[in-house]
Image (tube, rainbow, N blue to C red):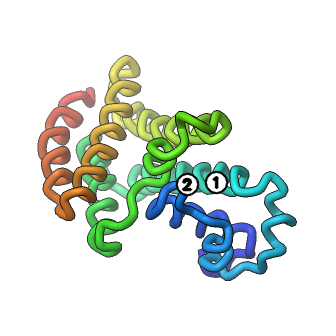
Amino acid sequence: MGGHGPRERVVYGCAQLVRERGVTGTGLREVVARAGAPRGSLQHYFPGGKDQIVREALGWSAEFAAARVRDYMDGTAGPTPGGLFGAMVEQWRVDLRRRGFVAGCPLVAATADVAASNEALRAAIRAGFETWVGSVRAALDRMGVPAGRAAGLALLMISALEGAIVLARSRHELAPLDAVEAELRPLLDGAAR
């Protein structure tokens, strides 16, 4: 996001900080500093304050995850459900290694932090997960998974991946990601017609 304007940098910077510290641990000064944006840009672009910035950061994060699913589908000859899940897992293996296990999914971080106490952010979290799950469900449909199974398998894939990310971060090791990929790949590939 380096070449984007201050508004986009603030949204991206907020998403990255929420990944590391949760919503309550993310301060506006840190967001501005991370974004390299003028402090006055917050009031200009985000009259709704921190909640607006966080909502937009969660939406951006969901769109980013959904775009990665679409990238797999568009860039893979003969995509498979297990291959899609493997690609999703691999993205997180790379990210966790590169960042030293300090940053997880902003949707999960926000859920753990504020979903019970902030209805507007809970709605944004829910919408974010629906965007991501919807992209996986659409990909499964395209790969021939029956509609009756695609929705449930999409939820299973996201749930297993998110749980494995949490466990990997707590253990500082990739074994949980390896385990969910090894166990789910055959199940997912068996679901395609």
Per the image, the residue denoted by label 1 is: 54
Q: Nearer the viewer, mark 2 or mark 1?
A: 2
Residue 105: which quarter of the image?
A: bottom left
Quarter of the picture holding the N terminus: bottom right
Task: Give the residue at x 81% y 72%.
Answer: 41
Query: Is 150 or 89 nearer to us in this picture?
Result: 89
Task: Give the residue at x 62% y 35%.
Answer: 123
**Residue 163: image x %, image y %?**
29, 43
Q: Residues within 10 Å of mark 2 (few under 14, many from 20)?
A: many
Relative to 35, say whether 187 is above or below: above
Q: Are marks 2 and 1 in contact (CB under 8 Å)?
A: yes
Any mark on residue 133, and which?
A: none
Per the image, the residue denoted by label 2 is: 23
Image side of residue 83 versus residue 52, left or right: left
Quick one: label 2 or label 1, which is nearer the N terminus?
2
**Residue 101: image x %, image y %?**
30, 66
